[in-house]
Amino acid sequence: MSSAFKKNTLFVVVIMITVLACIILPFISYVNPSLFNNMKISSAYADVEGYDFSNGDTVSLAGEWEFFWNKHIVTEKLKEAEPDLYVSVPSSWTQYELDGQDLSNGGIASYRIFVENISSVHPVVVSIMNLPGKCQVFIDGEFVFSNRSVPCKIHGNQNLVEPYSEPFTINDSGVHEIVVEVECEYSSGLTAVPVLSDYNQYLDSIMSSVALRFLFIGVVAFFAIGSASLAIMRKNFLSQLWLVLLCVVFIFRMLISNEGYMISHNFFGNINYEIMMSLMYATTFIIKLCMLMHLINVLGLKVSQITLVVISAVFLASAFVPYFTYDYIYTSKVYMLIQTIVYIFDGYMVFKLSDVVVKKERFAVLYLILYCICAASLVTDNLYLYGYISDTVSFIMPVSCFLFIAFMLFVHLISTLDTYKAAQKTAELEKEIAEINMTLMLSQIQPHFLYNALNTIKYLTKKDPKTAESAIVKFSGYLRTNMDSLTQKEPIPVSKEIEHVKNYVDIEKLRFADRLNVEYEVSAENFNVPPLTIQPIVENAIKHGVNQKAEGGTVKIKTYEEDGFNVICVEDDGVGFDVDEEKDDGRSHVGVTNIKKRLAVMVNADIDINSQTGKGTTVTIKIPKKEEAK
């Protein structure tokens, strides 16, 4: 099975599951509302027998309500008013027609139902949370709840940010009238579900929601600071910029919506909540854009610059352009159409993530799952805000985004730890290489070599000054290269190492004359080697190989390419030795050991030594070409 087939199959399956998740919740909430503790109201009547509100039962009053356009039937005392329509709650009134014309955004209206058998020994309340427009609720004509202001005569038309509620005591199990009066400047009606509950439980619920919301805000703020700090520690803040922005936008969303605005309204200058809700809708696009861009960045997905510009432009235009015309802000069909356009990019991202999963990248499956959950939760949140879901599911989006942010921070932390460990290991290797270079350099500059070289130069200064001058230049070059190796952390060009070998050999030839012959066959030069790699091997070939023969001998130095390797070969026809026999000559053989370590650490190379007694020795180094490419 090809990887392309796996990727395409996974993409189709994930898209189908995500779409199904977005459809199933609205479908179930209407077809079987009892699963969500909803009361399916028909013809503006509901029987809540069996619910004990004193024991914590709550009922979401979703279904068919009477609708009175351009009237507040309680505050205006229109007891005999006849409903203009029967409408579904929750829903936008722009979905309905009156006298052959569509209802527009903005205006006032009343909704009414009759509820029977309310059982509670404690006072009850009907509350409506997260409604953009203003509303007040009455039970049997008695005021019980206002979401953010009391628009008419009651309480002097105060502009209240916090919900204002009063308990209502049930004296009988008969039929009770529930009326919701709505006043909107830009929005369009009862798009949130009224909830019937025990009054004390309602107050506890408000406090718990506020506490939970600000706990989320505090934790995400910590995540943002933590992510930024880790990025700064790694000296790459831009790598986590989108995650930090996601945290900031998420915090803003939590502050301006639902119970968050009850606490933060002074900070925002008590702006009309309908306008704040429009900003909340805009953050939906920004949150998704931040998620998408962060994943592209952190996974290193191959996306062209043009595609990134198009994605950003579409999301930002979708977020802000429609809000320059308030006629369209709360038109659910228009907004959902805009949402549908950006869902295309969700599909694009799922396709990219499917490829990462098939390639079995680290955490790839979790990336895919969390992104799909967040995409589905944002769809669900929009459906809820526009009344397409008849239950309070506003917690789904914050929880899914919180999990996404937490996971991304976890991955960032793991990556930072891995980077720190790698850096620590690199530092240890560099220290080890430095120590090896020091040991090797000291092992190479032996007193007897210095003594012999200086004596030879001293002799030549009298007999052959020009040769002596040349020898001094070569000797100083030899010493300089050995000293430079102490601070050299990276491999050097093989040509530079060959030059060092030539300096050494020329000095030795002054001593051994015709007894030492060195041949060079350098056919490959486009690669690097650790410093002091070839010279010590050549030195061993001279000292312990050809120099041990009375007639001397030849050392051949070759470089060439072979089967994906750059090869260095040093051959001599000296006395050779038994490679299986441990030498006990009283000398430290630290030179070859250090060369092996540095070759393995710095260029991932192998060294092979073959020798036969009486015939000579061959040392072969094979350096993978892929290491050079790195």
Image (spheres, rainbow, N blue to C red):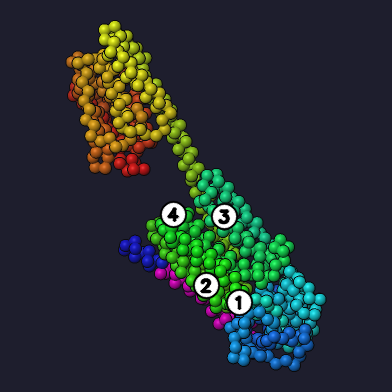
Query: Could one spot residue 94 in this view of the protein?
Result: yes
Secondary structure beneath label 1: helix
What type is the residue that disc 1 sits on?
Asp
Against 518, residue 303 (above or below) is below
- Mark pair 1, 2: CA separation: 15 Å
Mark 3 highlights which residue?
244
Mark 1 highlights which residue?
327
What type is the residue that disc 2 sits on?
Ile
Q: Which mark, residue 300?
A: 4
In-image side of 534 versus 156 (left or right): left
Please give the range of residues in magenta. 12-41
In-image side of 398 versus 82 (left or right): left
Secondary structure beneath label 2: helix
Residue shown at the point (66%, 72%) measured from the top left: 274
Q: Mark 1 or mark 2, which has the lower sequence index?
A: 1
Residue shown at the point (49%, 38%) measured from the top left: 424
Secondary structure beneath label 3: helix
Q: Which mark, residue 338?
A: 2
Residue shown at the point (24%, 38%) measured from the top left: 561
